[in-house]
Amino acid sequence: MNTIINKINKLKKEKNAIILGHFYESPEVQEISDFIGDSLALAQKAQKTDADIIVFAGVLFMAETAKILYPDKKVLLPDLNAGCSLADSCEENKFKKFLMLHPDRYVISYVNTSAKIKALSDCICTSSNAIKIVKSVPIDKKIIFGPDKNLGTYVKKSTNRDILLWDGACHVHKRFSAEKIKQLKKKYPNAKIISHPECEASVLEISDFIDSTSGLLKYTNRVEYNEFIIATEPGIIYQMQKANPEKLYIAAPSFEEENNICEYMKMCTLTNIYNSLKEEKFEINLEENLINKARGSILKMLEISNKLKL
Ligand code: 13P
Ligand code: SF4
C-alpha cells in the first residue's frame, strides 16, 4: 500500500500534477487527493490550480467541467466508465426538444450533466448554490431546471419561482426510503436526519437539514448534536468521522437491501490513479466548439458563486 502511495506522490511531483477528489471516493482515494470537495469546490479548484495535469478522482462530468474551464491543461480520469446515472438521465436530443417547446425560459442545468447539456444551458448550478443561482435570475424570467427532478422540486419550493422540471434522477439518492429512515429514527431518537437534495421529497420532508455534501459535512462539524442519519452516498462519512470521531454517523437505509454506494465514484482506485499518472490516461478530450459553447454557462455559475462568496 505504502509503495503505491509513494509512487503516486513521486509522479505527482515529477509531472506537476494534482489529484482532485470527491467526498464519495473511498477513504484511501480521499487520502491521496490533494484537494477534496463537493462539485462546486472541485470546479473552483480546477479554475485556480497551476498544475499541468489534473487527475480527477471523481466522475466524468467533473473531469469534463475541469477540461471545459481549462482546455490547455491535461485532464485525466482514471476510469472512463465512471459516469453518472443522473447525467445519463438527460439525453441531448430529448433535452433540445424540451427546450424548443419553451424558448422563453432561462435554462439552469445541474453540474451533473454532459458537456453537451451544459452547452445548451444558460447557467450551471451545483447542490450547494442551486437556490442562489435560481434567485439570481431576474424575477420575471421563467426557468427550466434539469436534470434532477428532486433537487429541482426542492429549489422550486424554496424559491417559489416559475420552474419547469426535467424528469431525471440519481439512482443512489432515489433509493433512500423515508419509511425505513423513520424506523431507524425510533431506534436513535436523538439522531438528526441530514440529507442531500437529490433525495426524494418524502425523505427531504422528514429531514432536519438539507444541503450539498460539503454542507452536510460542515453541519456535523458545527452543531452540538452527536448522532446523525445520513441520506447521501456514505463516502462522506469518512470525513465526518475524521473531523469528529466521537459522534455517531449512521448511513440511511434504502428501499432494497443493497446499500447506497455510488459504483461510479468507487471506480477510482489507488492502482488506476497510479496508472493514470504514469501513462497519462485517460485524457478527457472535447471538441473546441463544444468547449466554447459549454464554458459560458459554467463561468456564469462561478462568477455568481464568487460574487456571493460561496
Ligand atoms: P455535491 O455537489 O453535493 O458534492 O454532489 C455531487 C453528487 O454527485 C451528488 O450525488
Ligand atoms: Fe451521479 Fe448519483 Fe453517483 Fe452522484 S451519487 S455521481 S448523482 S450517480
Image (cartoon, rainbow, N blue to C red):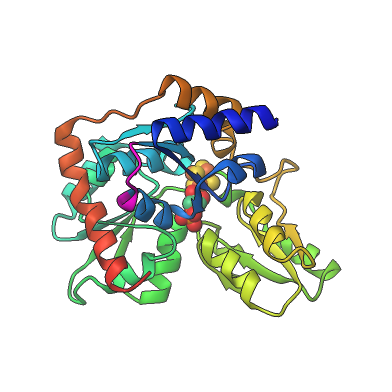
Q: Decide which of 106, 285 is in the foreground and name it.
A: 285
Left or right, 18 with respect to 180, comes to: left
Q: Is residue 94 magenta?
A: no
Quarter of the image holding residue 291? top left
Q: Residue at x 20, y 61 (%)?
A: 106
Q: Decide which of 217, 137 is in the foreground and name it.
A: 217
Q: How many tags in the picture?
A: 0
Left or right, 91 with respect to 24, comes to: left
Whether residue 144 is situated above or below residue 72 in the rendered picture: below
Left or right, 133 with respect to 30, comes to: left
Q: Is residue 133 visible?
A: yes
Q: Residue at x 64, y 53 (%)?
A: 176
Coordinates of residue 130 in the picture (x, y in percent): 37, 64
Whether residue 162 is situated above or below residue 19 in the rendered picture: below
Coordinates of residue 267 in the picture (x, y in percent): 57, 31
Q: Is residue 51 magenta?
A: yes
Q: Decide which of 54, 293 is in the foreground and name it.
A: 54
Coordinates of residue 136 in the picture (x, y in percent): 25, 72
| Magenta region, residue range | 47-52
Coordinates of residue 57 in the picture (x, y in percent): 50, 39
Whether residue 121 is situated above or below residue 92 in the rendered picture: below
Q: Residue at x 59, y 72 (%)?
A: 209
Q: Main secondary structure of the magenta part?
A: loop
Q: Is residue 206 visible?
A: no
The N terminus appears in which quarter of the rendering?
top right
Whether residue 271 is situated above or below residue 258 in the rendered picture: above
The C terminus appears in which quarter of the rendering?
bottom left
